[in-house]
Image (cartoon, rainbow, N blue to C red):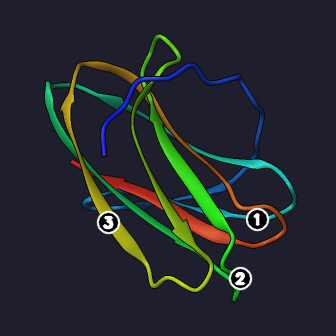
Amino acid sequence: MVTTLAVLGLLAGPVTTASAAGRVVECPGRNQICVNSFYHGVTGTVSVDADVYGSSSTKYRWELIRPNGTAQCYGEMTGVDPPRSWICTGVGVGQYQLRMYTGTNGGKLGFRF
């Protein structure tokens, strides 16, 4: 699913761990937006990996935010869904953020080029 929409700037403080394929952050689930920031150096695709811990059927949404603050693409999942991956296409050069609100649940949010 690809769309463009405006997003409000929100603060968060996730713990970041590096991996060879990209980066994954642990989302603390304390009613904050989980943020994973990165620089994308070439136009192409970004694979987004997301997981929300829990047993609820509430929908949680992640968004890949462009340098201008609009959403490049997004996806939705529930706490009962297994970890999922999406492909965002046409991602240009610049500083991007992955954002996801997990409510009081924890989760993970990552990317791969």
Q: Write down the residue under mark 1.
A: 28
* 97 left or right, relative to 43: right
Give the CA distance from mark 3 to mark 1: 20 Å
Which tag, 1 or 2, sits closer to the chain's start?
A: 1
Residues at marks 2 and 3 touching, judged by CB atoms closer than 8 Å: no
* 53 left or right, relative to 41: right
x, y (%) of residue 111? 36, 53
Label 2: element kind: loop
> In terms of depth relative to the viewer, which is nearer, 47 or 75?
75
Q: Answer above or below: position of 52 versus 64.
A: below
Q: Write down the residue under mark 2.
A: 56
Label 1: element kind: loop
The amino acid beneath tag 2 is Ser
* 90 left or right, relative to 101: left
Give the CA distance from mark 1 to mark 2: 17 Å
The residue positioned 76% from the left and 42% from the top of the image is 12
Q: Write down the residue under mark 3.
A: 85
The residue positioned 72% from the left and 72% from the top of the image is 106
Give the CA distance from mark 2 to mark 3: 19 Å
Which mark is nearer the camera, 3 or 1? Answer: 3
The amino acid beneath tag 1 is Pro
